[in-house]
Amino acid sequence: MSSIISSLSDLAKSLVEVVWSLFTTAGELVQKTIQFVLHLFTGAINLFVDFGKGIVDLFGGIVSFLLGNIAILAVLAVGVFAFLQYQRKQGNTVQVGNKKLN
């Protein structure tokens, strides 16, 4: 008789454990689904933010490249102008091809 009672007790414990595991599995599934959706939205937002940062960095690099080239060309133009002025003050003829500049 004692073995029947222990068997029924074990059966009841097993059924409770099965039901409990079903609820915990369903709860974990809902939790993981919510986490997935949140990570999906935050990932999409981060994608757009990083894309915007990349575009800003790209335009910043292009602008700095162009400004650097303009600065170099300006320094060269000032140097050529200063050289031509120096040559004129020395009384030398500045000639480009067959054309005199002064």
Image (cartoon, rainbow, N blue to C red):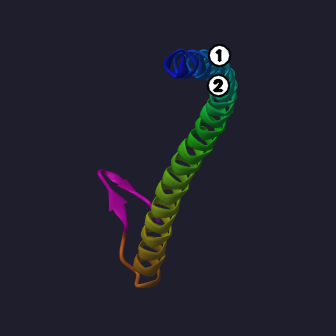
Identity of the residue drawn at 65% across and 16% down: 19
Give the percent coordinates (x, y) of residue 59. Answer: 58, 43
Q: Is residue 27 left or right of residue 86?
A: right
Which amino acid is tagged 1? Answer: Val
Q: Which mark is residue 24?
A: 2
Q: Is residue 23 left or right of residue 63?
A: right
Which amino acid is tagged 2? Answer: Thr
Indicate the quadrant where residue 83 lies.
bottom left
Residue neighbourhood size for the residue with mark 1, other residues' Cα within 10 Å, grouped as few (<14), some (14–19), many (≥20): few
In the depicted structure, whether residue 66 falls above or below residue 48: below
Which residue is the extreme one toward the front?
Answer: 1
Give the percent coordinates (x, y) of residue 53. Answer: 62, 43
Work out whether mark 2 precedes mark 1 in sequence or the reverse, and give the earlier one: 1
Give the percent coordinates (x, y) of residue 4. Answer: 53, 14
Q: How many marks?
A: 2
Task: Write the start and end of the magenta stretch as one range.
Answer: 94-102
Q: Secondary structure at mark 2?
A: helix
Q: Which mark is residue 19?
A: 1
Quote the CA–CA distance across marks 2 and 1.
9 Å
